Image (cartoon, grey):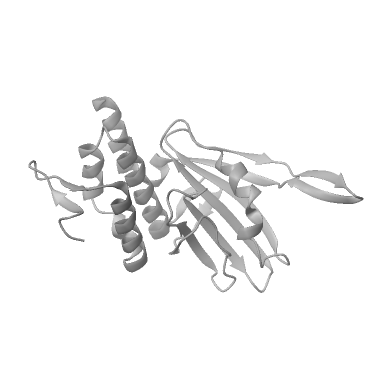
């Protein structure tokens, strides 16, 4: 953290030398600071300053939304997530801990991740769990995170085989809210019924429902483009 990687340009704007440096400092902040680290008004100013850099906009919005949900929870119609601690980890997936009742799991390897965040609610006594993978989508075009996550859900849910697991997928986007349900699909294989597509609920929540100031800033950026 010196002027080899972070510097102030002639206009007084703070900059960094490359995306790897941005990733490194984000990992440091997520591991060593509190959840509200990305909740200051300076981050809205960052969006305006870098309004023509889609990479910076997407990254900044993602960090603001993650910190907001972890600090204040999320409430949209009949869908609710509580405030909880963020557990940041390396790698695209990890095994969920049954010793943590409410936790947000955040992958730090940005170039390998399938989702941006995962919420897990685990009740050891009742043997129940609610798992909510979360994808924050600012761009109109986005990868199929649902298919990618559920294709590898066994890694996430390892150790919860005896639990009744409810699954929801949450999209946080710059658009309308809504919800739908994906039905479980089974296939007969060697006399056994195999799950080829798990059943789960899909929720769409607008950025405005999470942070109205963030929504106003993004609208302002669109008008300036």
Residue 143 at x, y percent in the picture: 52, 37
Q: Measured from the top left, where is residue 203 in percent x and y? A: 56, 42
Left or right: where does residue 222 sit relative to residue 62? left
Where residue 201 appears, x then y in whole percent?
A: 63, 45
| Extreme residue in the left direction | 10
Residue 31 in the figure: left or right of residue 136: left
Residue 5 position (above or below residue 181): below
Q: Could you tell me which residue is drawn at 35 percent across and 45 percent down? A: 59
Number of callouts: 0
Q: Residue at x 64, y 48 (%)?
A: 150
Furthest residue in direction right, as rendered: 191
Q: Is residue 58 above or below residue 31?
A: above
> For this rendering, which residue is in front, 192 or 124?
192
Location of residue 99 by image quarter:
bottom right
Residue pictured at 66% horizontal, 74% vertical: 125
Q: Nearer the viewer, residue 214 or 224?
A: 224
């Amino acid at each position: 953290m010196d002027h080899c990687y972070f510097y102030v340009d002639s206009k007084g704007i703070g900059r960094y030398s490359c995306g790897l440096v941005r990733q490194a400092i984000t990992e440091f902040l997520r591991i060593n600071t509190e959840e509200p680290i990305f909740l200051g008004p300076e981050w809205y100013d960052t969006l305006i300053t870098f309004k023509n850099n889609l990479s910076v906009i997407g990254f900044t919005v993602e960090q603001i939304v993650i910190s907001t949900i972890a600090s204040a929870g999320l409430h949209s119609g009949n869908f609710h997530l509580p405030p909880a601690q963020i557990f940041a980890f390396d790698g695209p997936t990890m095994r969920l801990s049954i010793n943590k009742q409410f936790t947000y799991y955040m992958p730090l390897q940005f170039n390998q991740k399938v989702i941006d965040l995962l919420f897990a609610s685990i009740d050891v006594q009742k043997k129940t769990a609610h798992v909510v993978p979360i994808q924050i989508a600012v761009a109109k075009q986005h990868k199929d995170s649902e298919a990618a996550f559920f294709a590898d859900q066994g890694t996430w849910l390892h150790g919860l085989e005896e639990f009744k697991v409810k699954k929801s997928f949450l999209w946080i986007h710059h658009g309308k809210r809504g919800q739908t349900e994906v039905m479980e699909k089974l296939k007969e294989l060697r006399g056994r019924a195999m799950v080829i597509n798990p059943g789960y609920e899909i929720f769409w929540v607008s950025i405005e429902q999470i942070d109205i100031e963030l929504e106003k800033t993004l609208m302002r950026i669109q008008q300036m483009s």
